[in-house]
Amino acid sequence: MTTVQSGSGSMVRRILLGSQLRRLRETKGITREDAGYSIRASESKISRMELGRVSFKERDVADLLTLYGINDESERDALLSLVREANIAGWWHGYGDVLPSWFQTYVGLEESASQIRTFEVHFVHGLLQTEDYTRQVYSLGHPGATSEEISRRVDLRLERQKLLVSERAPQIVAVMDELAIRRRVAGPEVMRAQIEYLLEIGERPNVSIQVLPLEFEGYPAAGGRPFTMLRFPESDLADLVYVEQLTGAMYIDKRDEVDQYGKAMDSLCANSLSAQKTVDRLRNILRDL
């Protein structure tokens, strides 16, 4: 049985519950097809349940536990309790009007991570943006959006940023291309405030900011694409890589692929400016504005 941390979000609980159901099924040598038949569902639904990609019905999980021979009441109660916790809607569901379904998954995982390592190429990382910088980025990216919609998107990002100062704040390692910081997505005042904020937030013990300098030739990360690596406090939950695309996202959890991203991140950190030199570079950029 997995002990779920008190700060774990519903998304993590769902993934953990799915993985436990998969292990119980495989231990009994039961096929997904037979498991699906027992709960009046398809093989593909069992697959989605085991991957934590759908919500769970308590009745379905109870029937599966019976099929898998789990009759001990304490064990059943623990798993059924996890069902109820996994189905609790996160705060971000209130932003469904401006939050794509594929990004809801990421926000839920981000909320539960103990470590976030990220590489940004085009913009300052979202968790480190000021309100005015965020507003300008969204205005540029959604030229047809109303002011109300832009404000909703900004509010969503500000809610996400509360994670950095919460009691269970994760360790943030943010590597950003110097061009991402120098790129003037807004006027001098907004850009100046953004860089000053990076200098301020970078002093927090859980935040590490490194600049990949312009003089560095090439990228250790394939193609120079931005990506984020998430690590969780639960031992049963493997590291995950998130790669955002224009109309969706990839969630990479295969061990060998995650390891490749880990090596790329290690290389990026090694080739970026140290924390102190990053502070010096940010101050130089400030003077250039």
Image (cartoon, rainbow, N blue to C red):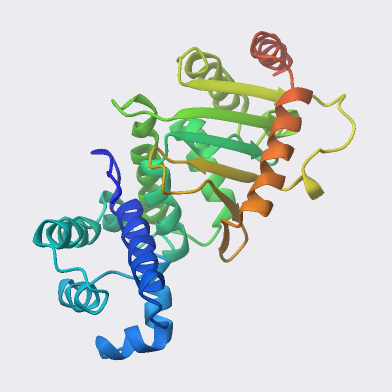
- Kindly tell me whether residue 212 is visible in this rendering: no
Residue that appears at 50% across and 48% down? 238
Side of 181 where 86 appears, left or right: left
Q: Nearer the viewer, residue 57 or 158?
A: 57
Q: Name the spot of residue 74 as percent of width and height, x first.
A: 11, 56
Q: Name the spot of residue 178 as percent of width and height, x first.
A: 74, 28
Q: Name the spot of residue 272 as percent of width and height, x first.
A: 75, 23
Vertical side of 247 occupied by 136: above or below: above
Residue lying furthest right: 217
Q: Nearer the viewer, residue 118 or 126?
A: 118
Report which quarter residue 61 is drawn in. Answer: bottom left
Vertical side of 62 occupied by 227: above or below: above
Residue that appears at 69% across and 36% down? 265
Q: Nearer the viewer, residue 66 or 223?
A: 66
Residue that appears at 31% across and 60% down? 17
Q: How many marks?
A: 0
Report which quarter residue 167 is drawn in. Answer: top left
Vertical side of 174 occupied by 87: above or below: below
Q: Nearer the viewer, residue 65 or 133?
A: 65
- If the image is split into quadrants, where does the C terminus sit? top right
Residue that appears at 60% across and 26% down? 191
Report which quarter residue 194 is drawn in. Answer: top right
Side of 80 where 261 appears, left or right: right
Q: Name the spot of residue 196 as percent of width and height, x first.
A: 54, 16
Side of 58 where 199 appears, left or right: right
Residue lying furthest left: 73
- Kindly tell me whether residue 19 is visible in this rendering: yes
